[in-house]
Image: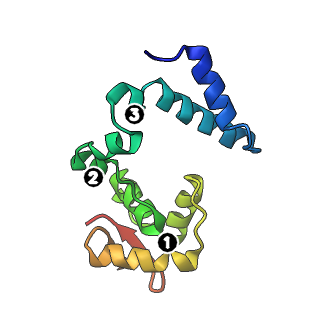
Amino acid sequence: MTKPYAELVAQAEHAVAGVKDAELRRVAFERILNDLLGGGHEAQSGKPAAAARAAKPARAKATAKKRSGPQGHVEEMIDDGFFKKPKTISEVKAELENRGHHIPLTSLSGPMQKLCQKKLLRRQKADGKTFSYSNW
C-alpha cells in the first residue's frame, strides 16, 4: 500500500531540510518527491530506483547526450544555422555570450580549428588578416 501524499511531502521536506540554498533545496525537493511518488521508487516497481534507471534502453542515453564545452556550443550554433553567412571569431564569441556561454577568445580558436578539420565549418581569409567561418 502506498503512503498518503502528505507523508511523502513530509518525507521529502525532511530530506532537504539541511540544504541552505533556496533554489537548490527547491530542485532537490521536486526530484525527491517525484521519486517518492513513483518516478522510479522501489515500492512501485519492486526494484531499487538505480536498478530501474539502469534497465532503460541504451538508446535513451545516446539521445539524451548533450554537447558541452566550447566545441559543443559552437556545434549547436552550426545546427541552428548561425554559420549560413560567414562570421568572424569575434562574432562567434559575441553570439556565445548572448547564449550565456562566456568563453575567452583564446579558448575558442582551437575548437573552431577542430570543427574546420572535421569539415563542419569552412575557414576563409576575410580581409587579409582575419578569418571567417561558414558552413560548407
Q: Is residue 20 visible?
A: yes
Q: Position of residue 115 (x, y in %)?
A: 34, 72
Mark positioned earlier in the residue sequence (3 or 1): 3
Q: Residue at 59% of width from left, 58% of height from top?
A: 97
Disc 3 residue type (three-letter): Gly
Pick out the residue farthest to the bottom: 129
Q: Cα distance, mark 3 to mark 2?
A: 20 Å
Residue position for label 3: 40
For the residues labelled 3 and 2, say whether their Cβ atoms are less than 8 Å apart.
no
Q: Quadrant of residue 1?
A: top left
Q: Position of residue 10 (x, y in %)?
A: 65, 24
Q: Secondary structure at mark 1?
A: helix
Question: How many numbered discs sit on the rendered protein?
Answer: 3
Q: Cα distance, mark 2 to mark 1?
A: 30 Å
- Viewer-closest of 88 and 44: 44
Residue position for label 1: 89
Pick out the residue farthest to the right: 20
Q: Cα distance, mark 3 to mark 1?
A: 45 Å
Q: Position of residue 71 (x, y in %)?
A: 42, 68
Mark positioned earlier in the residue sequence (2 or 1): 2
- Viewer-closest of 116 and 27: 27
What mark, if any, has residue 62 been given in the picture? 2
- In this rendering, the answer to whether 96 lies above or below 126 is above
Q: Secondary structure at mark 2?
A: helix
* Image quarter (top left, top right, bottom left or bottom right) of the C terminus: bottom left
Disc 1 residue type (three-letter): Ile
Q: Is residue 126 visible?
A: no
Q: Quadrant of residue 29?
A: top right
